[in-house]
Amino acid sequence: MSISNMEKVAVLTEALPYMQEFFGKTIVIKYGGNAMINAELKQKVVQDIIFMKYAGMKPVVVHGGGPEITAALKQMGKQSSFVGGLRVTDAETMEVAEMVLAGKINTEIVNLLNRSGVKAVGLNGKDANLTLAKKHLAQVVENSQLKEVDIGFVGDVERINPEIINMLLDNDYIPVIAPTGVDAVGNSYNINADYVAGEIAAALGAEKLLLLTDVEGLYRDFKNRAGFVSTLTFAEATTMIAKGLLDGGMIPKIESCVRALAGGAAKAHIIDGRLPHSLLLEVFTTEGIGTEVVKKGSETL
Ligand SMILES: Nc1ncnc2c1ncn2[C@@H]1O[C@H](COP(=O)(O)OP(=O)(O)O)[C@@H](O)[C@H]1O
Ligand SMILES: CC(=O)N[C@@H](CCC(=O)OP(=O)(O)O)C(=O)O
């Protein structure tokens, strides 16, 4: 299919207001493990990030890698288990998670970006104490009672120290961040990448948080793929969390969006990373795609 010159011009002019709106603004992109599996798609995501950078935005990448951690553990004969969407992480799993996230995936994304003409720098939670973590206790319902369960070295973000990110952004680098954390005595923690992205968006006062995943967005009834949600208000999102209406991978995603909005972001989006150039479609077109979580003017946070 070829498009006419007029159509090309229409595409460019449609993008102009978004270029103006986001020029100089920080955009946090969470690149999820399930949308990373295919090399061709990975290259398109990298291209979109570069496009955003050259359009004057300040992209910050936070990546996941859940499926690769699961595969590495499986190779060692270890089964993965999850509670509330979070991986049960014993000491051995923590070591594997850190190797895969900080050692393999992080360097791979940095390499792809640098080979395409931008300056990317990889960071993990230990670099300049970027992500201070504390132990996460999972909440489970047992015999109609809410219980707290220890699931190992799984962390919550206690504090983000954004100086290193700001230093890199001020000097034109793209920070690429692995979702690991460290506590006050040097223990490593495995943190769901959505949470890290939401906290980083909040700490940076980012304009937007974009969560790339392997589904079109949020469904009210996921089993039947019914009730697709294009727009969710901050209040609706917090209610869904409080009432336990979410499950699996959508729990950390919606919580991450809420955190980013509470920290000052104007919008957070859950978009389909399987769709080629989904980042460009979201950022530079009028329709946008996926599920957006927004603050209404009247909503107080
Ligand atoms: N209500 C829902 N709407 C959409 N997806 C849902 C919903 N509830 C659970 N999910 C699951 O959440 C997954 C996305 O989360 P996750 O697997 O953690 O992705 P990622 O690796 O991209 O972070 C979807 O593939 C889907 O299986
Ligand atoms: C505690 C916890 O669950 N950590 C995640 C970290 C990676 C991640 O979040 O990867 P995705 O974004 O690809 O799901 C894990 O071990 O899978």
Image (cartoon, rainbow, N blue to C red):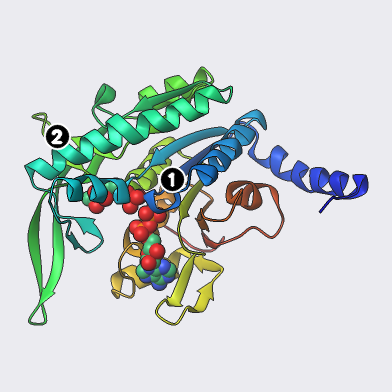
In the picture of the structure, the residue carrying the numbered disc 1 is 30
Quadrant of the rendering where the N terminus is positioned: bottom right
Q: Position of residue 128 (x, y in %)?
A: 27, 22
| Whether the residue under disc 1 has CB within 8 Å of ligand 2 | yes
Amino acid at the residue labelled 2: Asp
| Mark closer to the chain start, 1 or 2 | 1
Which-is-in-front pick, marks 1 and 2?
A: 1
Left or right position of 37 against 89: right
Is 96 placed above or below 216 here? above
Q: Residue furthest top?
A: 171
Q: Judge by depth and name the residue closer to the eye, 179 or 44.
A: 44
Q: Judge by depth and name the residue closer to the eye, 262 or 88.
A: 88
Regarding residue 195, the answer to whether it shows in the image is: no
Residue depicted at x 33% and y 62%? 249
In the picture of the structure, the residue carrying the numbered disc 2 is 183
Is 183 placed above or below 71 here? above
Neighbourhood count class around disc 1 (C-alpha, 10 Å): few under 14, some 14–19, many 20 upward = many
Q: Quadrant of residue 241?
A: bottom left
Quadrant of the rendering where the C terminus is positioned: bottom left
